Image: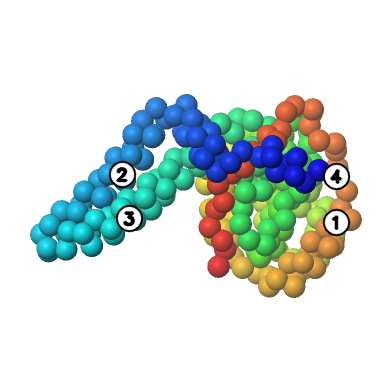
Amino acid sequence: MAKSEDQEKPGRIKQLRMIAQIIKQANPKGMPIVFLSAVGTLAVIVVIGLVTDYLWYSLFIGVLAAVTVGLVVFGQLAQKAQYSILHGQTGAAAAVLQGMRGNWQVTPAIAVNRDQDLVHLVVGYPGVVLVSEGPGNRVAKMLAAEKKRVARVVLGIEIYDVQCGDGEGQVPLGKLQRHLMKLPRNLKKPAVNEVKDRLRSLPRNMPLPKGPMPKGARMPRGPKMR
């Protein structure tokens, strides 16, 4: 079974091609930007090598630098492209949260209403974070109710509520990971694991929404929380 699953996974080159197609669909100028950034980096370093009489050395360094810059730009454009694809989909915030690096535990859709607004549960070094999807006037009550319910299980632990969306006072989808990373580090690793254990007994208020949620959407990994 393991071998057959591995065979079904696309190779690294195929994955890069798939991501390149996604970038091209989201931004037709994306791949030319990647190419020009790499070539521009190489040209600058080669010129420096000509001026300093270190042409071959600068050519070697330039190729490495060009590949590095190209990959960085490629990754940034891929992230923006995937955010644009997820934007507006039910469960988009959950897909982004599950792409976070580090000691984070994400439980999608612990609360859902009839309008398909969602509340996700995140546990990490800041404590507990409740992240909502939906208009602010609808999700405010959901967040307040979930915050009260979670507080009964994790006494004395900081609980944050974050509204993900494009409305006033909400955090845009593309800035959600960064927003959580900036929260204070209130817990150490043993305490984080203890909170996770406590919250395993917390039941969902309602079943998962009937609408399609992003499945297998691999968001580019964000920076690790230091």
What SS does tag 2 mark? Answer: helix
Q: CA distance from mark 4 to mark 1?
A: 10 Å
Q: Amino acid at mark 1?
A: Arg
Say which label, 3 or 4, has the lower sequence index.
3
Task: Name the residue: 27% across, 50% down.
Answer: 41
Between disc 1 and disc 2, whose residue precedes? 2
User: Is the C-beta separation of discs 4 and 1 under 8 Å?
Assistant: no
Query: Nearer the N terminus, badge 1 or badge 3?
Result: 3
Q: Position of residue 116 (x, y in %)?
A: 74, 30
- Residue type at tag 2: Ser
**For marks 4 and 2 on the same chain, the one whose residue lies earlier in the sequence:** 2
Which one is in front, 41 or 217? 41
Q: Amino acid at mark 3?
A: Ala
What is the image's colouring? Answer: rainbow
Q: Residue at x 73, y 28 (%)?
A: 212
Q: Quadrant of residue 59?
A: bottom left
Residue bearing mark 3: 65
Q: How many marks?
A: 4
Q: Which residue is mark 1?
A: 200
On the picture, is 58 further left or further right than 53? right
C-alpha separation, residue under disc 4 versus residue under disc 2: 47 Å
Q: Which mark is residue 37?
A: 2
Q: Nearer the viewer, residue 26 or 87?
A: 26
Question: Which residue lies under the disc numbered 4?
Answer: 204
Indicate which label's residue lies in the foreground, 1 or 2.
2
